[in-house]
Amino acid sequence: MGAIQALRGTRDILPDEVKYWQQIESVARTILSRAAYQEIRTPIFEQTELFERGIGEATDVVGKEMYTFKDRGDRSTTLRPEGTAGTVRSFIEHSLHAQGGVQRLWYTGPMFRYERPGAGRQRQFYQLGVEVLGSADPRADVEAIAIATNLLQTLGLQNLNLDLNSLGTPEDRQQYRDALVTYLTPYKSDLDLDSQDRLSRNPLRILDSKDQRTQAIVQQAPNILNFLGADSRSRFEKVQQLLSDLGIAYKVNPRLVRGLDYYSHIAFEIQSDQLGSQATVCGGGRYDGLVSQLGGPNTPAVGWAIGLERLVLLLQQLSAAPPSILDFYLVSRGDRAEAQALVLAQKLRQTGFAVELDLSGSAFGKQLKRADRSGALACLILGDAEAENQTIQIKWLVSGEQQAIAQTELISSYQQLQQRITEFRAQEPAKAAQ
Ligand code: ATP
Ligand code: MG
């Protein structure tokens, strides 16, 4: 029988790559908690209706991309394609608005969309996102954007571009939609097939078409910014002013529309020119109508989501692999030494060291080679002689120096050893990062 492989559009994240994911998660946790964002965890599947109502039936996500199935109780169930709808459902279900003030939430986890897989595009992919519920203040938009840029910069990513647009109020948008349809209708047969289909269902999305002929037609289309009412315009200007105050560079892009139906006012994307065609790392905006559309009280809201596969691709290009945290690689040979080594490894870990125990039972030479490759700072060597007198050889792999010490000294000299480890890490980050 042939071996079973992962499904198309899904992939395993192996330990070498997981390092990058953990780095992202740890930086994100720090940055988000410093800004008083709290983590929320919602289910991976929900009633299909949540997404139909929350994302909009005319969108690609709901129309073509959802993993929807009947469960054994005949309920229409969908694997979540994004995180906002579930977060808002939870916000309403648990009356989080009753706590008053602003709710700043963040989440991370897998999302599912039946799409054509490629680099940075999966059927199961991961997002990290934030939702700020309960503030209509433009400062909430800008704070959210600033946290995204801070996160990306802290991870070492440069040369990212922030594109910004305003979709105005639903009324502004309706007027623009009418004008766009009037402009595009005479060109209908020249548009790509998807765009022809969108002309009646979701015409704003045509602005986003990657098709060259459609793009050329769209160049001359009416500009959404000319359809903003006075309120929408001053709000958009305020956001730009605040971004400038924070020193965050941006470009106004009147053709930026987002896939989901519920946006109003600010929409934005952060892109990298190092990702080829899947350039968007982060997308977000304001969605003042969503909470009430899902049956909750009128609640203004703004949020964004980062696609983590694309972020990992960018981090790998920087090749800034997070260093190994291993302090010791423990090798031993002979019955008595091996038994002692197992006990010692456990004691060292309880004391606070990171220790890998070689279990191979092979010749010392082979075990020492593995120690070199392990990324540990020192190799601990326990043979018959050491087992006999309860000592151990400690060999610092960076400098090559080696000495015998009492096993108990490893524990009692914890502070001094940690200090040496810190010094070696600072001296030889390249070695430690192997
Ligand atoms: P795209 O135009 O790339 O399809 P989108 O507008 O559908 O993106 P959003 O729903 O805004 O994407 O999701 C936010 C982010 O999640 C995207 O900017 C992207 O980084 C990531 N993302 C979306 N779909 C996928 C996918 N199928 N695989 C990997 N990442 C994805
Ligand atoms: Mg998409």
Image (spheres, rainbow, N blue to C red):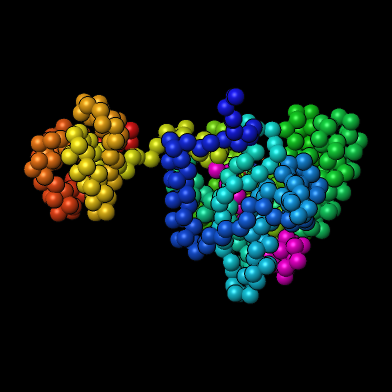
Image height of 152 relative to 240, above or below? above
Closest to the observer: 401 or 305? 401
**Residue 223 vs residue 147: left or right?**
right
In which quadrant will I find the C terminus?
Answer: top left
Residue 18 x/y as whole percent: 46, 40
**Residue 304 vs residue 172: left or right?**
left
- In the rendered image, the residue lying farthest to the front is 335
**Residue 342 vs residue 323: left or right?**
left
User: For residue 49, which quarter of the picture?
Assistant: bottom right
Taking the spot 65% from the left edge, 71% from the top edge, the residue there is 95
Residue 214 x/y as whole percent: 79, 32
User: For residue 75, which quarter of the picture?
Assistant: bottom right
- In the rendered image, the residue lying farthest to the left is 389
Residue 254 x/y as whole percent: 71, 45
In which quadrant will I find the N terminus?
Answer: top right
**Residue 398 vs residue 183: left or right?**
left
Residue 360 x/y as whole percent: 29, 32
Q: Is residue 400 visible?
A: yes
Q: What stretch is highlighted in magenta?
A: 289-308
Q: Does the magenta stretch include residue 299?
A: yes
Q: Does the magenta stretch include residue 324?
A: no
Closest to the observer: 73 or 328? 73
